[in-house]
Image: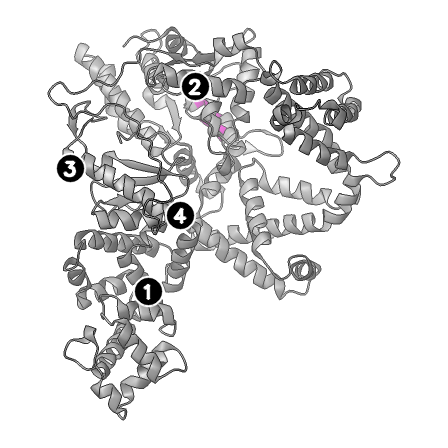
Amino acid sequence: MKHTSAQQQAIQARGNVLVVAGAGTGKTRTLVDRCLSQITDEASPTPLREILMVTFTEAAATEMRERLARSLESLLAVKPQSAHLQETLAQVDAAPIGTLHGFCYQLIRHHFHQLDMDPNARIMEPEECSALCEETLDALLEELYQGTGTFSRDLRDHMTHREKGREKLVRELVLRIHHFTQSLVDPQGWLHHHIRQTMNPSSEAWDAMLPETFLQWASQWHQALSPLKEVNPHAARCVEHLTSYLEADDRHSAMNSCVEALTQEDAPDQWPRGSKQAYRSAIADLFDDLIFLRSLMGNASVESSPLQADWSLHRPTVRLLLELAQSFTEAYRKTKSQRGLLDFADLEQHAIDLLWDRSEEEPTDLARDIQRRYHSVYVDEYQDINGAQDCILSAISKDPFQGNRFLVGDIKQSIYAFRLASPRFFKAYQHRWEQTQLEGPHHVIYLKDNFRSHPGILDFVNAIFRHLMYAGISESDYLKKVALNSGAFQPKPTASDSETASETVVHCRFICDEEHSEIPTMEKEAMVIAKHFRRLHTEGTLVRDPKTSEWRPVAWHDMAILVRSTKKYGESFLKVFHKAGIPLVAAASELIEEAACKDLHALVQMLYNPHQDIPLVAILRSPFFHMDDQALAWVRIHHRKGSFWAAMNHLSRDTSNPELSEGSCSSLNTRNLHAAIVDCVIQIQNWRKTVQPMSLIHALEWILDTSCYREKLMAADHGEEALMHVQAFLQMARRFAQHPQGGWQPFLNYLDHLKHSGEGAPVGDGMPASAVSMLTIHKSKGLEFPV
């Protein structure tokens, strides 16, 4: 396929290039072909090792390598004697193509001596980071509660009188502040600056923020209401007031006038009979905002401003939270250092330590060396960059007048604000480079021709984003720069030799409340999806293989379920799909809800402390012992005091009660209840004694081998799937065993955190080679599933 004129321009442009690449516009192809054009430039070829390509995910990096290798192979087929092409193809696997975190990790490994850190430090999984944060915060709060200093007294007073002894909100705020600061170029500098501000009894800091905040608010509402001017006269008048403010020479003075004018628009006499219900709903939120804004601005007749009153009230709390976040950040850093651990934020911050002089706000000598090493720096998905990442990429790129950056992104696809990514950096480059295209080597290029979607979908998307994100620009500018056009879209063809080939089909199924009313709604949804997937799989519906482009019968791994939260939906879907015999892979937090994993979780809890009733009873009811509810009730009836383990021990030694020797239970076959209790106690005591010197993973594997637990699972329904869950659980334990503190209690803390947070990467090893995927909409970005 030939390149579009915009793609060709992006491939050939040199200097700093920013490409606004809408969905389906061939950005990956453009990236690869631009790289090839530099490598094969006859006048001045660029070695592949001098082109740094930064992608958002490892999968994207792998795809980039594969595409580049295939393109080079195609060129070699035409020029088989080209030594340059042969050498470049041999370099593909070692080429600097990868994620930003991968680049940072390699940088840190090579310069660890400058950072005074362990060169063998291990990068934690995200869920492991969360668990360690909670552990560190627990220890910090406990230490402060017992302290005698002023800060400890202030904290105890705040927790007692303001929080009523509840830690939850304080913990959440401290962790949010910490994670936010780690996305900045200078986390400690930010904390120091804002802590100093809280030492000032005057509300100057907040007073200075109000005009800027109001400007942002006015701009947003101006964009939101502009499309309504023709159909809503009240919205039109509000736009006029906002325009007057935005165009005023002295916005500070115009702010109060704007608020008053907008407030007057909601006066009763401004709404003719019958018009309020028709027109006010579209601007109701604006009037709600105005009530709050007026409360901040106060009244000239009042000596103390509302902001000053709020500042005086909240200043001690703000300072306490900032200082607590500062203490936590330092405690967390020390804990990671002592255990030889890193999180992903450390990779960014250590890279900045090496590449950026925070005091002088300029690149270090090392950064300048890297600038000379790379002829070009390519960055994909720039709309999802944060401040720290932008600093790193700026530090290793040449200065603006030499221009060697190639940035690709699209703010319409920015979906990672919850990870503190911000499209403002991409927008800033877009604005600045468009303004200076005639002054230096700067180019802003728009890829608008979409080759993936039906024209009707593009019309819908353009209508939404035209008003949602670009209301401030004219219709002609939107169509010229941003609107997606239909490229060479072709409906997906059907296989010529089969009527079961898959076309693009959308099923919309509404589940009535009366339908299976006794079943929870989520399970109903899962049943509908499982039934549909089973039919597609049984009928051998054909789908086009994304790698070979050949038609083949659909497999389980071709199917995906997208949900807002795997924690919310996971348990119900796993339960239904398990009954339907359909393999489903979800995050680790859902895996531990599987029956076999619950057994192993309870086993670890019981081995660590048998006096926990719930884990012990779970183990007794599991395939390890097969005791049923009747047998368990007998134990508690005959010994009501103490823990269940104490009751088991007491009854195992008691042979005086005739009821015990005569009692029987359906699950115990021919053996009497007393003998079963004795066997259980002896077995558990033997397990606990034997595994005491063992590591966690060796203890689990030994018990599974000697108890025939796997064999018992295989004899039951869905045994193979249950066995895969056991292997996946062991994989988690094995991975956790690499942790320097990977003992029993830390592993239990890790599992509890997984269970309650809903976090955890999908567990792969030991799971079915082909399985339906359940993942969040965010996790699905960049992936493609036929079903």
Along the viewing direction, whichever of 333 and 294 lies nearer the viewer: 294
In whole angstroms, how far apart are the C-alphas of marks 3 and 2? 35 Å
Chain-order first, disc 3 or disc 2: 2
Residue 121 in view: no
Label ID, residue 567: 4
Q: Residues within 10 Å of mark 1 (few under 14, many from 20)?
A: many
In the rendered view, tell whether residue 282 sits above or below residue 589. Answer: above
Chain-order first, disc 1 or disc 3: 3
Q: Identify the amino acid type marked 1.
A: Ala
Magenta-drawn stretch contains 42: no
Q: What span is in magenta? A: 366-372
Classify the position of the C terminus by image quarter.
Answer: top left
Give the quarter of the image for residue 293: top right
Query: Which mark lies nearer to you, 3 or 4?
Result: 3
Residue marked by disc 2: 460
In whole angstroms, how far apart are the C-alphas of marks 2 and 4? 31 Å
Residue 417 in view: yes
Chain-order first, disc 1 or disc 4: 4
743 with respect to 240 (left or right): left
Could you say whether the residue bearing mark 2 is in a helix, strand or loop? helix
Q: What secondary structure is the stretch in magenta mostly built from?
A: helix
> Residue 632, percent across and down?
30, 75
Chain-order first, disc 3 or disc 4: 3
243 with respect to 102 (left or right): right
In whole angstroms, how far apart are the C-alphas of marks 1 and 3? 37 Å
- Count all numbered tags in the image, as a single digit: 4
Residue marked by disc 1: 602
Query: Which mark lies nearer to you, 2 or 4?
Result: 2
Q: Identify the amino acid type marked 4.
A: Lys
Q: Identify the amino acid type marked 2.
A: Phe
Q: Residue at x 29, y 8 (%)?
A: 2
Query: Which mark lies nearer to you, 1 or 3?
Result: 3
